[in-house]
Every structure is written in C-alpha cells, then in structure tokens.
Amino acid sequence: MSSTKYIFVTGGVVSSLGKGIISSSIGKLLQARGYKITIQKFDPYINIDPGTLNPYEHGECYVTIDGMETDLDLGHYERFTGIQTTRANSMTTGRIYKSVIDKERRGDYLGKTIQVVPHITDEIKRNVRYLGETGDYDFVITEIGGTIGDIESAPFLEAIRQLKWELGRDAVSIHLTYVPYLRAADELKTKPTQHSVKEMLSNGIQPDILILRTEKHLDDAMRSKVAGFCNVDLECVIQSEDLPSIYEVPVNMQRQGLDAAILRKMGIPVGETPQLGPWKKFLELRNAATEEVHIGMVGKYDLQDAYKSINESLSHAATYNNRKIKITFINSEFLTPENLEEQLCGQDGLVICPGFGQRGTEGKILATEYARTHNVPCLGICLGMQMMVIEFARNVLGLTDANSSEMNPDTQYPVIDMMEEQKTIKGLGGTMRLGGYDCELREGSRVRTIYGKDCIVERHRHRYEMNSRYTPDFEAAGMHCVGTNPQTGLAEIVEIPSHRFFIGTQFHPEYQSTVLHPHPLFLAFIEEAKKGNA
C-alpha cells in the first residue's frame, strides 16, 4: 500500500461493549491478510495515565515494554495480535493537555491564544498520526475510550472528524453500539443505535461500519432497518453476539466479512479470506478440553478486570494443557487461620496476586504458608512473591517480625525493602520501576528449565524488592534466589526446589502471555497443577 490507513473505533449507548476486543479482532484479521498493524487507545479521562487509579475504578493497569502504565485494553491488543505496544500506543486527555501546556510555557505557540480547537485537536491528531508516520505499519487502529455524548470525548471526535476529511478513503470510522432486548415486549430495539449514530452525525462523523452488540441474534430485516436509518451499507452492519469466549470474536467478525468491508471502504482489493489456522487450532483445543483444573486467585480486589492479564494467561496455559480453567477468587482480606483449609482445600494450584498496600497481605501470607506446607503448586507475582519471602522468613528462618517496610516501616527484619533508586523519588505517577528489565537465570534451577534460556526480559511495576542482606539465610534454608538482574543484582525470582512448584517473580509474567505464545511460567504452573493434589 502507498500510505498508512487509519481505522477509528468508537462506542455509543453504553460503555463496556467490547471496543478493545473489536479493535484487537480487526488487528488480528488484518494481520492474517499480511498487513502490518498497530493499535492505540485514547482515553478521555484527565489522569496522565491509569497508574494511580484504584483497580476498582478502571480495572487492571497494564504495563508496556518501555514502562508506560496504560489501560487494560492494551493487554487485549498484545494478546490477540502478538504486537508489542509502547507509550505511543496509549494517550489520555491528561497527557494531551500537559503536552499543549508545556509547549505554551516554552513559547512554542508564539503568543497565540490556546484553544481546544485547534491546539488540543491538533495535538490529538499528531498523536494519531505519529505511529503511521514511522513507516512501520500499513494500518493504525485507534480506539477512543468512553461513549459518544460524554463531554470529555468531544475533542477526540472533532479530531477524528478532521482526520477523516483530510485522509479521505485512507480513514474508516467504525461505531460500536448496543441493541437491547426488552424481555417484557420480547423485542430487540434499534432506537438506541439510531440515536447514537445521530450523535455521531451531529459531530460531523458518518460511521462507515456499524457493529451491533447484542445478546440475541439479529435477522437480516433488522440489520436492513439499521442500515436504512443510519446511512450504512447492509454489508457494513455487523452483529457482535454473546459468545462463549472473547477469542471467538475474530472468527465471528471474519465470518461476517468485517475485514473485507474495511478493505472495500478503502478501495483495497479484498482477495482470498485467510484461514486463521493457528488461531482456530487454539479454539479447537479450548473447546475440546473436558477436564478442569482449579486455580485459586488470592488477592484483595474482588473485580473481574483487576487481574485481567493473569486470568487470561492462566486461560491460555490451561488450553495448551488440554484443560478447562476454573478460577476461584479468594479474598485475602478475609482469610484467617480458622477458615484457611475450607477456602483453599479444593484448589489444584494457587496464584498469590500482585497489589499495593497492607490490606489483605496477612491473608496472602497465610495462603503461601498453606501452599508451601501442603505442597500445593503456587505462583506468586510481584507483591505475591514478596509475601512468599515474608512467610518463609517468619516460619522457616524464625524471624517472626519479618515484613516489608511498605507494610511496617519499623519492622525488625525488613526482608522486603524499598529499592535504593526509589528512596529519593517524590510523587506517585510513573515513578516506580516500570517496563522490561533483564533477568539472568541460575543454571540448574527450575525456572532455567522452564524458560529454556539463561537470560530473559520481563516487565516490572514495583517500588520494593527482596532485601539482599538476607539472601544467604534464605539460600541456606532452601528458598533460592534463582533470577537476578545483571546490572543491579536485584532478586527477580525465588523458588523452593524441593517443592512441586513454588515460584515467585518480582516481575509480571502475565504481561507477555499471548494466545499463540502462552507464557512458559504459566504453562509449567498449570502442567503441575493439573496433576491434582493427593
């Protein structure tokens, strides 16, 4: 193709319709046709990034390889397509305004009055075009967060309107709406979609393709009605029904010709429909699995999206181990010595979840003790690894006051302590150890066998670390520090070799598991867990 093409994905009626899954599916289908793609997310909230947001507010905070804290949809983009996103793939209103204000303070605007139009919209357009201008991509897919009609979305819609005018056939607008089913009337209603498109038109944007989110199948007559009322070709009215898995969505979209419709709108030859062989093989494995593996997720955020990447990584690994995953959330805040056995006894494996703050940490420590003493496969991630270290220090090394200085600054035995580089940092946003760092794996260790290599790169998001002052005591007692950063010597991985599977990582392996390339740590964890517990 002669120039980069742009696809804009917006949503109407209600939030949580799955714009991220649709954007990821479009990327996957275009990749299957041989195109180079990338996907970016524009979030209208004024936070610089979601790094300081409570997971109850916005779900999981995803971290890119270059250390940007982003929306969880970037995790979907990477899991579906296998691309590596960067800070250029994530933008918020906060970052847009900060960039404009910084330029104004430097005098870049030569005394002009700074306005939403053109200065804010130009900055949005610059960021939309940035990835396309690298020359690395045939398609840039841009998802706009929020819902049409939200006051904070207005500058983004104006920027899209301008870009569609400037780019002509090189830009396509895809609008995702909801078609509700009224049980009392036994009818599907298209009026919300009509109003959503009317709202788009009032912003000067005619959607090229409509994707209708629905719990019930829409017949051709209803699709024709939507097409007629919304000035959209019938072949460009696609329905997105409820499916057993989000991973069925690309196949469903291809079946209805979404990728072909995009290409036709842009004047690109459609050619033959790709087969999606490896993706369909994954779905076949997933659907063929009958036996379950039961994994307990021990954490404090009782919200599905709070641990999204971990859940999906476990799901990938279970599929490739020919198992259905059954994940049970276990709220660590309410774990006690009295109910521990009842809460954990039915699980084939335990994941000790990441997090921040003291709430729920003692419950996580109880869970790690249970896993260690009952020989239950256990994977600790970030704070979860730190809880493994604290539990071992208290109950094996006899350091009964052992703790993290995050939880107890006055602890006599700070086996987890703040990283030296963090001690002089002020403020919270974007100041942790973030992104990809090297980790050398000890020869003869379990993790060296699992990874099949001696050096790895994994993504981090933390301020505290295992205190190396105590490393010899841990090693002598049977907990080995088997992964270290070659530049700093920081402990990255601990394991107990005598245990079936007791591994803690300071990094977040879940950020690098994809549908077609599941993460080796999760694969090995599920492989051991599926053996069950005697």
Image (cartoon, rainbow, N blue to C red):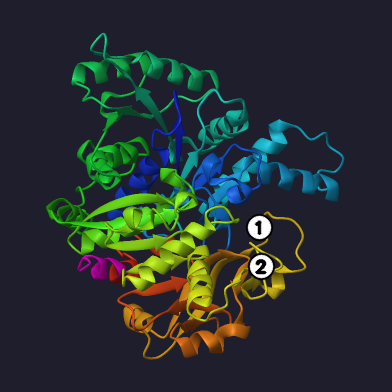
Along the horizontal axis of the image, is 233 left or right of 433?
A: left
Q: Earlier in the sequence, mark 1 or mark 2?
A: 2
Establish if 508 lies above or below 120. below
Establish if 198 lies above or below 211. above
Task: Name the residue rendered at 37%, 43% in the picture.
Answer: 21
Residue segment shown in magenta: 525-534
- Most foreground residue, 67 or 227: 67
- Most foreground residue, 458 or 481: 481
**Residue annotated with mark 1:** 430
Question: Which SS class for mark 2?
Answer: loop
Q: Is residue 62 visible?
A: yes
Q: Which image quarter: residue 269? A: top left
Residue 67 placement (x, y as % from top left)? 58, 62
Q: Is residue 38 visible?
A: no
**Residue annotated with mark 2:** 405
Asked whether residue 503 is drawn in magenta, I would say no
Establish if 129 lies above or below 463. above
Q: Amino acid at mark 2?
A: Ser
Residue 451 placement (x, y as % from top left)? 35, 78
Task: Name the residue rendered at 27%, 42% in the picture.
Answer: 249
* Disc 1 versus disc 2: nearer the observer: 2
Quadrant in which the C terminus is drawn: bottom left
Question: Which SS class for mark 1?
Answer: loop
Within 10 angstroms of label 2, few (less than 14), some, or many (20 or more) residues? Answer: some
- How much space separates mark 1 and mark 2, taking CA atoms? 21 Å
